[in-house]
Structures are given as structure tokens and as C-alpha cells.
Image: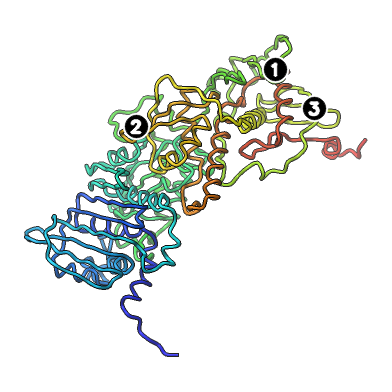
Amino acid sequence: MSVKVLDVNTINKIAAGEVVERPASVVKELVENAIDAKASRIEVEILNGGKSYIKVTDNGIGMSRDDASLAIRSHATSKITSINDLINVATLGFRGEALPTIASVSKFSLWTRQKGDELGTLLRLTGGRDQLIEAQGCALGTTILVEDLFFNTPARKKFLKQNSTEGNKISEYLTKLALSRPSISFKLLSGNKMILNTPGSGSLLECFESIYGREMSSSMLEIDFQDRFDQNFRISGLVSTPNIVRSYRSCQTFIVNGRVIGSRAISKAVDEAYHSLVPKGNYPMVVLVIDVEPSTVDINVHPQKAEVRFEDDSTIYRSVHRSVKQAVESGRFAGREEEPPTEIISSVLPPIVEEETPSVVDQIEEPSTVDDQMIDEQTVEEKIVEPEPLVDDQTIEEPTVDDQTVDSKEDQTVEPPIEQGQTDLMFEERMPPKKMTPIGQVALCYIVAKDDNTLYLIDQHAAHERIIFDRLSGSTDGVPAQQLLTPQPIDFDERETQMIANNLDLFRQLGFTLERGSDGRYSLIEVPVDVQSSDSEGVLREILSSLPTIDDSFGDDAQQRKVLAKNIREACLATTACRAAIKAGQELNVRHMQTLLNELAKTKYPYTCPHGRPTIIEFDSDKLATMFKRKGF
């Protein structure tokens, strides 16, 4: 065995495996170089998710011919000169690996010109070889074109995902980077479609609004935290009210000293600050800008500089937790000089399910409610239910409503989102219960029923949710829809827009008809008949937030796309059923309860709701005997 020193080209290809994982990695390195070059405008163009074409143009300071020829050599950088510079490094790049590794796995072209130079420099390489360098006219700044990425490393190219997945990775990264640099104008074009366009005004709120829309930005709370003992430690940014959540953590952006990073300590602190305010598995929208003394954070711990190591994680955790919690509790909305009125402040409390109008099919009416603190439960008088004529088992009539009924805690929670791949097949298909005879209600939430040998407790909301879900699922012609009087425009983020664009027909079958206007915004035209029109946007956003992220788990394989389509359908139907079902706190008379139980017994999975929660708890005679320590009958 003989030991040999690898040639430079092989070394660069090996290094590319760490620095350049996918097209988004290329964009990251090139855009960070543009920022370090003091650019105020950066434009990124991609084709086929960046696989075949990536072009990054900036108006930075540019390079001379000599600097350009050195820049494509390994470990050549203008950012640092010695190891001591790593302690206080202020630039995003500093290793000098990006350009040579990118050039080694692509067809690489670079145009650059400095201020005062009549001509710029053109540099071309193919797979890191066949270098061409010549003078050429070009604009001030630098433009880099990367074509046919991984053309000479087919194994790496084979593992790239579908175009939409790779494009979303680029969009997600640039969105976070734009939030970290609101003073820079960013543009992202995919083909002829404008994906991202920030103003570069220097305002974080304006940058956020350009990405997520005015409606979303108006619901963001402001953070401004200054450490009393360390003037160099400050936390600022934006956090959403607890009623605005997503099912994916990528909606959270953490920025430390101008660098977008990932940190378990910060993520955990944010989760704890919202603990009990948002449903499990959901995440608030967050943009945290953390400024600390550079010497207290190590950014040289990850090849892509995506993670950092703090000198004191516990201090960061406590400060983030305190600042986020204070922002949520204070209700100080970003961009508003005056104190928000009481009704606006209330929106930072846990979301409460609004009153429902009668369903077209089920005709269930929500009872009126009052503040829990204004009612002594012991003084609530029982309401006498007048006899009613017999009803058809297929229809649930409007229940008698007590005006003093208090909303139960069930109304203040949101159903947990459907997990990816969750279907009714996860639950054992059991025989439906025998004919159950209702006895009454407990806490206006649970129906007590019996048969000859068993006592039952039934969650009325979960049971009705199962009934509606099965009815909608069995609709072969699609979910019945009602047209809105006027189209309702809605601002979606890039992930939601991509999800809708790829599944317009499926959403239409499920009762949601959306049309895209010339400005790129979608408008809601039709909604399911079981959904109140005023609540339609909330239902649609809830569905989108519960869907799996368009990520590596879904490729070009047709079967995988079917899985995604199935998940979308289940999420739509489950959310629609949840919103249309009767609620806890709603009084039912005996006839209503009997009709509900009869319908539940006809469903395929009567023991679970579409979200997997139990609908029925049984106590047979043997279990009752055991509970009462009897030996049996």
C-alpha cells in the first residue's frame, strides 16, 4: 500500500460534499459572498430548482482581475488573515472554500468589476478545469452563473430531489436571510415567476410584510430586550400571537450577530415561552435578532456555519424565554405607536373556537356564552326541555340552548394536526357498539348512555366529528361547496402557495376553489357547505398548517405524490368536520343524543375521531364489578 497526496481537483470535489449539498447550498455561499462585498441589491435567478441554472447578481464592490483569479483557489479569502481573526469575525464567509468547490462540480462563470475600472473580468471553469480569464465589459459588482450542477458527480446529482423541493429550499433560505438583512433588497426569480422581493428599507417589519403579507405582519408582536448587565447583549425581533401557528419549525428564524443559525437552546426557549398557549406540534412564527459579544460565540463549528456554540447556553435560554414571554404577555404589536385597544390585546390569549352557524346538513347551533368568571356554576338552573315531535334518525335538530351555558375548556383548544401518513387504518376496526340509550350529559360535554350490559361515556364533539368526516369521505362526487358572494383574496407564504398550486384540483374536490390573480395572490371562490363563509380562511389556513412540509420525503415518485394527496384530503375533511361538529358546552336533549348515537354506530370507526382521539369509553359489567370490588353477579 502506498500513500499519495490527492490532486487539488479531487480535494475540491471531496470538500464539495460538505460545503455544497444541494442547489440551496450554492445560493447560500454566493449570496453570503455578495453580502460581505457590501451589496445593497442581490438578485437570484434559478431554473429547475437550481439544478440546471443559478445566477446571483449583486452591486457590491466587485473584484480586480488578480483577486478574481485567486478567489477560485482553495482557502483564498479576504475575510481573515490569521487564526486570531476568528475570534471577532464579522463576515458571513471566511474559509475560502465556497467558490473553488462550487466551480469543481459545475460549469462556472464569473463577471466582476470594481468602481473606477473601465473593463471588468470574465472567468470561466468547467468542473474546476479549463480556466479562461479575460477582460470584458460588465456592470459594477459581481455576477456568478452556475450551470449543470453536479454534472461530473452523477451519484450526487441522483440524490437531488424534485424541482419544487429544491426550489423551496432556496426560497426558505433566502427568506430567512432577507429577514436577517432588511437593509438589503433581495429578489428571487424561478423561471419568470417572482418568488421573493424585499424593499431593502432597513425595517424588519416592512421586510416581513413583503414576504408574508400585511395581514400577517399586523398580527406580529414586537420584542425589544436589553440585558441590564451586558450592553452588548440585546434581543429584538417579531413573534406571532398564539393563534397564528404553523406545523413546521421552518417558520422560525434565529439570527445571531447577523447570521442565520439553528440552535436547540433557542428553539427550546421559544417552545417553553408558548407552552400551553399553542397546540402541541404547532409552532409560532418567530424572527429573533440576537446581538452578543462576538467573542462569546463560536461560529466555526459547522461546515456550512449553520450552527453556533455559545459560551453560556443557559444565559441565552433564559433571556430568549423571558423576552418572548414578555412580548406575548404585553401584546405590544409591531409598528403601532399607540397602545392597542382591549379587544386587540385579547387576541394574544389562547385561541377560542368561535360560534358556529347552523350546518346546512346537521342544523346544529352554538349556544351563547359569557365570561367564566361572571357565573357561579352552582347557580345555573337546569333547563326543562319541552317535548318535541319525533325526528328522523338521519337529521340532528337544533338543541335547546341555555343562555347561561359556560364554554368549556374544550372550546379553547384546537384539534391536534393530522400527522403525516396518519389514516383510519392506524386504528383497529372494531364492531360498533350495540344500541346505546342516552341517560344524560356530564359537563355539557359527555353523553352518558347504556345498553343491557354496558355503561358508555361519549365525547359529543368527537362523535359528531366522526359522523361528519365519514359522510364527507364517502362523497364520491366531491364535497358540496357554496360560492362566496365576493372572492376572498388571501396572502399565503411560499410553502403554502406551492402546496396550493400543486393541488388545486384536489382542493376543488374538497370544496375549496381558489383562483390566482395577475398579482400572484390567490382568492377563495367556493368553500364547503359545512364551513361558515366568515370562517373559511381560518379553516383553509388550519388545513395548510397541518399538512406535511414539502420536503425530501416527497420526490418525483408517483406513489409518494399519492400519499401527499391522501394526507391533504384527510386534513381537509378532518378540519372541516371538526369545525362543523357540535362543541363541548352545547346542551343536547335526549332526542338529539339518541340521534347522534345512532349515527355514530353506523360509522366504520365509531371509537375514534379523525384526529385519533377516543369517542367512546366503555364500562361493561365485569369492569364495573372490578371497580366496585365485587366478585361478580
Of callouts 2 and 3, which one flags the residue occurring earlier in the amino acid sequence? 3
Q: Which residue is pictured at 50% across the width and 51% down the height?
A: 554
When the figure is inspected, residue 252 is found, relative to residue 107, above or below; the finding is: above
For label 2, the residue is 517
Q: Give residue 476's quadrant in the image.
A: top right
Task: Tell me if 68 is positioned left or right of 324 in this view.
Answer: left
Q: Disc 3 vs disc 1: which is toward the camera?
A: 3
> What secondary structure is marked by label 3?
loop
Residue wearing tag 3: 435
Question: Is 99 placed above or below 204 here?
Answer: below
Residue contact at pointers 3 and 1, CB within 8 angstroms = no
Q: Quadrant of the N terminus?
A: bottom left
Question: SS for tag 2?
Answer: loop
Can you see residue 96? no
Of label 1 and label 2, which has the lower sequence position? Answer: 2
Q: Which residue is mark 1?
A: 589
Q: Quadrant of residue 402?
A: top right
Residue located at (30% from left, 63% from top): 295
Residue 489 % position (x, y): 37, 29
Q: Nearer the viewer, mark 1 or mark 2?
A: 2
- Relative image position of residue 258 (x, y in whole percent): 29, 53
Question: Foreground residue, 478 or 179?
Answer: 478
Q: Decide which of 526, 43 is in the foreground and name it.
A: 526
- Residue type for callout 3: Lys
Q: Amino acid at mark 1?
A: Asn
Question: For residue 206, which quarter of the picture?
Answer: top left
Quadrant housing the C terminus: top right
Q: In whole angstroms, how far apart are the C-alphas of marks 2 and 3?
A: 53 Å
Amino acid type for the residue under numbered disc 2: Gly
**Furthest residue toward bottom:** 1
Within 10 Å of disc 1 (Cα), the crowding (few <14, some 14-19, many 20+) is many
Spatial separation of the CA atoms under disc 3 and disc 1: 18 Å
